[in-house]
Image (cartoon, rainbow, N blue to C red):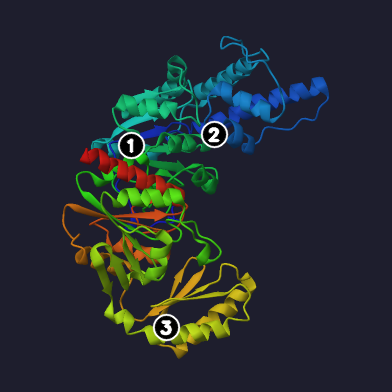
Amino acid sequence: MDDTKGSSAGQQDLTAFEAAIFDLDGVVTRTARVHAATWKRLFDDYLRARSERSGEPFLEFTDADYRAHVDGLPRYDGVAAFLRARGIDLSWGEPSDPPDRETICGLGNRKNALFRQVLEAEGVEVHESAVALIRSLRKQGVRTALVSSSRNARLVLDRAELTGLFDVIVDGTDAARLGLKGKPDPDIFLAAAEQLGVPPGRAVMVEDALSGVAAGRAGGFGLVIGVDRAGQREALLGAGADLVVSDMADLCAGKTPAPGNAGARALRDADVADLVKEQTPAVFLDYDGTLTPIVARPDLAILSEAMRAAVRRLAGLCTVAVVSGRDRADVERLVGIADLVYAGSHGFDIAGPGGLRIEHEEGSAFSAAVGRASSMLQEVLAPVAGALVEPKRFAVAVHYRQVADSDLPALEAAVDRVLEAVPELRKTHGKKVFELRPRFDWDKGKAVLWLMEALGLDRPEILPVYLGDDTTDEDAFRALAGRGVGIFVGEPGAETAAAYRLDDPEAVGRFLNALAATLERRHG
């Protein structure tokens, strides 16, 4: 399924959630096209008449106008947003204004009259795949709600004979009665979750409008699914969707395609307590890109004081280890916290509290080969502007973040020639980096499993949690599948074996503090 960049291997069970909340227009029913058509008729008629009166040019209402200013908003808010975008200032008026009155409410009421005329003449078409999904979810005990900004939602559901599919309905009339803000505020979705008796973090939300997806993100829902029926996949992801599908047929009440980045769903603050439950976490942290932002040169990746405080706070409550491709002494110096376990060179070199010191024998056996490769790379890459060779104890990295795209083929060819001369090493890939590492079966996943055993953490009451951002961290995510938690750090869209996702190092800091707070409450 191209829209999700996922595969069945990364699918997530929708029935793991207690509730599913669906938008109406464009998700369950095909009334979105009716709304779009009636909005166009309303504004084209109004703009044409205004042009004839004032002599200003007539510019028609477009699909882009609909998506940017109207889609998903309460009716009067949609009128106001579009007119404001066109520089037209009308008084708000009253909800009782007749359809021919030139006010925000009058135009909104005119649009409603046009919509009802079309609905009466043509009836309601439904998205059968959405109906099938909802029926299947309900059979498996998932509660369902329907949310819509439209005051016609109940009428549409009645015409389509779908009212019985939902335990809760919150529409535009309810929003006005309860004083709820419209999208992109999450009020109406939160009201639905409250009526269902389900925390937002335990509910799936399905929307096709950018404003609705943004509302789901702001409301902290456990999984926000965007339905792309207008060619706006990237915009839906940008608005906060964890997963984008082209049709509800891409979902089923059991497994879904991978949320946004092949299985990882956005980790909310509300998820943290559920994540650890009664287990004690053992937290394994990558450094570059996880604790610090990715920077142009490795020596510029400096840990912020706020992040250092968050790591130190958590380390006082559970085991915390930093697992990095950097040399162990280097990452230990950069972090500067005595109570941590440090696993450098992808776990070849380990040190920690109480005099812990373990060095992988196989890694040491390759030190001569690493030294030869480092010298050769510095010589052959000297002419390549921006190339940076980083010698390490058990590996050598070639950073090309500052190398021109036109020079990349020559750079990689030079690295490959060095590999031919030093066959004891193998090439691995990371974010704008090649790394030559010992040619034997060892990676961060094996390092984490080995660390758990060496530190006495391989017990049912311990929950290993690994956070990382790079391809080398995928080995750890896969190693912990079924026995721990993987958290990918990065933007939606990247393929990953992790179950959860955090946006960036700042979000990592918030997560570490939230986890520490959970453990502090548990310990009293």
- Name the residue furthest left: 460
Q: Quick one: SS at disc 3? A: helix
For residue 9, which quarter of the picture? Answer: bottom left
Q: Position of residue 503 (x, y in %)?
A: 45, 49
Question: How many angstroms separate mark 3 from mark 2 (CA)?
Answer: 63 Å
Name the image quarter holding the C terminus: top left
Amino acid type, label 2: Arg
The one of 384 and 237 positioned closer to us in this rendering:
384
Q: Which residue is mark 1?
A: 134
Task: Return the disc, 2 or 1, that comes first in the chain's sequence.
Answer: 2
Mark yes or no: residue 5 visible.
yes
Task: Return the disc, 3 or 1, that comes first in the chain's sequence.
Answer: 1
- Residue mark closest to the camera, 3 vs 2: 3
Amino acid type, label 1: Ile
Q: Position of residue 128 (x, y in %)?
A: 39, 39
Amino acid type, label 3: Val
Question: How many angstroms separate mark 3 from mark 1 (CA)?
Answer: 57 Å
Q: Which residue is mark 2?
A: 33
Mark number, residue 370: 3
Does residue 76 lie above or below 293 as drawn? above
Across the whole image, how many numbered discs are drawn on residues? 3
Mark yes or no: residue 161 visible.
no
| Number of other residues with Cα within 10 Å of mark 3, as a class: few under 14, some 14 to 19, many 20 or more | many
Does residue 147 lie above or below 490 as drawn? above
